[in-house]
Image (tube, grey):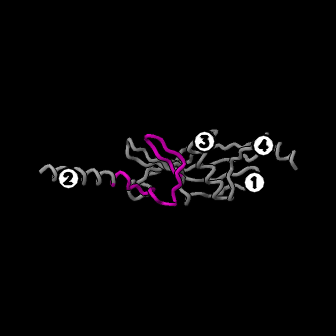
Amino acid sequence: MFKKIASALMVAAAFGCTLASAMFFDDNPRYIQVGHDEMTESYIDMNSINSIRYDPPYYVIQATVLTYDYSTNTATGYQNNFFYNFNAQTVRTQTLSTMTYDTLKGTPSAQTINPDPEVATTDRYSVNGKAADNAFFNCYNMTFYHTFDKKKDAKNSERN
């Protein structure tokens, strides 16, 4: 009797874990993770990336960043414009619309257009900062953010 109960509990636990991990973005190369914490995971939808402006050092790329919230079991997509200044190494983000997704199929179920979207400065290490860097790499085959070590560069130039 005890073995049957223990066996049933193990099957139920395995089934519960299978349901929790069966999201449309799992193991799908279309979605690249750009952030996570104890309650959320965020991804950039690589199929949504579209270069809008190529005018070095200024660029604009449109892309959708998707966030899954485990506390509410909801997936939300944010269609963003990323505004880049390559010389200043800054990115600004404008959210054009918000979409809710069917969490099993991965299809948008509703979309809300932001009537007057603001443009905000984006931190390099934020979800949008990482998404912007991925989008830039996808479009131009190089990372947007560069880290220059002046001391290291000075030592290298002294050797030459």
In the rendered image, residue 68, in percent from the top left (x then y), is placed at 44, 47
Q: Which is in the foreground here, disc 4 or disc 1? A: 4
Marks 3/4: CA–CA distance? 23 Å
Q: Quadrant of residue 102?
A: bottom left
Instruction: Identify the amino acid type marked 3.
Output: Tyr
Q: In this view, does 56 lie to the left or right of 115?
A: right
Foreground of the two, 27 or 110? 27
Q: What element carries label 3?
A: loop
In the rendered image, residue 12, in percent from the top left (x then y), is placed at 25, 52
Q: Which is in the foreground here, disc 2 or disc 4? A: 4
Characterize the local packing of mark 4: few (<14), some (14-19) or many (20 or more) Cα atoms within 10 angstroms.
few
Q: Residue under circle 2?
A: 8
Characterize the local packing of mark 3: few (<14), some (14-19) or many (20 or more) Cα atoms within 10 angstroms.
few
Q: What element carries label 1?
A: strand
Of pointers 1 and 2, the one earlier in the residue sequence = 2
Q: Is residue 99 left or right of residue 4?
A: right
